[in-house]
Image (cartoon, grey):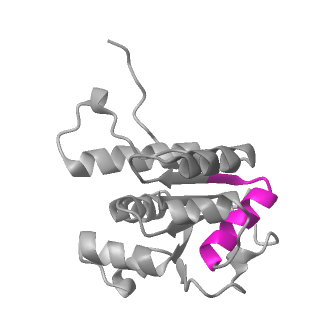
Amino acid sequence: MAADVVVGLSGATGAAYAVRLLTRLRELGVRSHLVATPAGLLTAHHELGLERRALEALADEAYGINEVGARIASGSFAVQAMLVAPCSMRTLAAVAHGLGDNLLTRAADVTLKERRRLVLATREAPLNLAHLRNMVAATEMGAVICPPLPAFYLKPTSVEAIVAEGAERLLGLAGVPGAAPTPWQGC
């Protein structure tokens, strides 16, 4: 399997997860490919003060949302996995219904059709029935739904620690070599 991972950033709160994923992928020597929705870019700017160029600089390659001809939109470009963090309910709905209407959702669709790992860090609360049904549909197609919920049993001491552990768990679920989520040691 290729040592490339696609990171999608959509317009839900939690842009810090995408930043941490890109940082860790670089540390692990895994090539990253970033695609962000306009709402994802807006959220990264609002939450983290990151301009588009600064965000894109964290990735090995970055693509515009409308670049549907980019190589990550083709199954012939083998990537190990795709993570969408955060994953908005709009993006989840598009994935669940096979709507490859932009590069992020097209890359997710390709990931599923090629039977590669797709991890969706969904962000919304409370959930309505449409959200739940879309999660079921995406799961039935092979996606892993993993809301980035804090593991308080690890006794995190900062928001950064919560984000770091959540991102590490996402990387582990994606099968990224070297990912090291903290295992539960028991009471």
Examine the image and state in which quarter residue 3 appears: bottom right
Q: Position of residue 55 (x, y in %)?
A: 38, 78
Q: Residue furthest top?
A: 187
Q: Position of residue 148 (x, y in %)?
A: 41, 46
Residue 50 higher or lower than 27, as above or below = below
Q: Residue furthest front?
A: 129
The residue under the point 34% across, 82% down is 54
Which residue is nearer to you in this view: 130 or 118?
130
Q: Is residue 123 left or right of residue 5?
A: left
Q: Which segment is the magenta one?
A: 103-118
Q: Residue furthest left?
A: 157
Residue 67 higher or lower than 49, as above or below = below
The residue under the point 69% across, 72% down is 106
Residue 81 higher or lower than 91, as above or below = above
Quarter that holds the N terminus: bottom right
| Residue 41 visible in the shown view | yes
Q: Position of residue 56 (x, y in %)?
A: 43, 80
